[in-house]
Image (tube, rainbow, N blue to C red):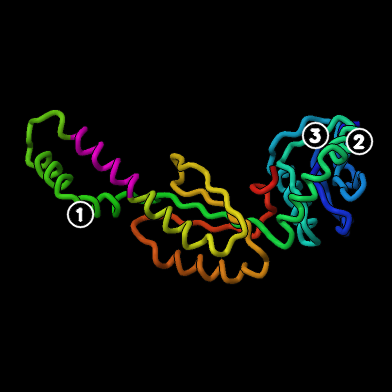
Amino acid sequence: MALYVYSIAGKGHSLRLDGLTGVGAEPSPLRSVTSGELSAIVGEISEDIRPKRRDLSAHQEVQERLMADGAILPLQFGYIAPDEDAVLRALEENTGAYLDALARIEGCAEHHVRASQADEEPLLRQILEDSPEARDLNDRIRSGDPDPHLPMTLGELVAREVEVRQQTLADGLVQALLPFAREHVSRPPSASAFLNLSLLVPDERKDDLLKAESNLAREIDGGVDLRFSGPLPPYSFVT
């Protein structure tokens, strides 16, 4: 039967699975499939799994329970192996890489930082105050200058300035937070966020990171929405 694979753990992990409910309409008991120094935490599955709230929560609950007892390599939601032999082959063929990854993340959790422009008005006002060129174009438009190119020129200038300022802020946030992390992953800006940063943070630095995050949240203004989450299973640091 097909197996839903939650995560991979090393031989020293307690694999405390009692009371956990897995994914699926009729979740099967969770168990481990072991090869040498590695175990995969799995559950039998007989259906296609879609990312519904209940199943996403069940998947995450398993990861958090296991992570509380030691290092794990959490798999992304929806990973299904055709049978137990396939799981065993994966463990055997990738033993070295999995053990190295477990050593890298030992004693760490993922923390995520996301910054987006919740309100553009403060930033646009600041740009008009700081940029004589933008201010001049804006004044000409407001005074009724008939040049049809003015709005586009102003819009392009402001867009460039917004990008520069957001990138500067993102760079500053990254530099302020990196000292607390063993590793980091920074994803490209998107329409919804100009900073999307994942940090692999040792447990002993967690409190220091939380204090730094609190200070940064107080210092940043200008309509920026700064969100922190964690500790989380280290999905971003498992390849």
Residue 117 belongs to magenta span: no
Is 173 placed left or right of 198 in the picture?
left
Residue 80 marker: 3
Residue marked by disc 1: 130
Magenta stretch? 151-164
Residue nearest the viewer, comparing 218 with 23: 218
Which residue reaches farthest front? Answer: 96
Residue 84 marker: 2
Q: What amino acid type is highlighted by mark number 3?
A: Ile
Which residue does the image show at 29% across and 41% down from the upper left? 160
- Image coordinates of residue 100 in percent, x first then y, are 76, 50
Quarter of the view holding residue 172: bottom left
Tell me the SS state at disc 3. Answer: strand
Residue nearest the viewer, comparing 46 with 132: 132
Tell me the SS state at disc 1. Answer: helix
**What secondary structure do most residues of the magenta stretch adopt?**
helix
Residue nearest the viewer, comparing 121 with 91: 91
- Image coordinates of residue 135 in percent, x first then y, are 15, 47
Which residue does the image show at 46% across and 46% down from the upper left? 193
Residue nearest the viewer, comparing 92 with 4: 92
Q: What amino acid type is highlighted by mark number 1?
A: Asp
Viewer-nearest of discs 3 and 2 = 2
Quarter of the view holding residue 144: top left
Which residue does the image show at 53% across and 55% down from the upper left? 113
* Mark 2 crowdedness (10 Å alpha carbons): few <14, some 14-19, many ≥20: some
Disc 1 to disc 3, how far (Cα)? 55 Å
Whether residue 82 is situated above or below residue 26 in the rendered picture: above
Disc 3 to disc 2, how far (Cα)? 11 Å
- Image coordinates of residue 103 in percent, x first then y, are 76, 56
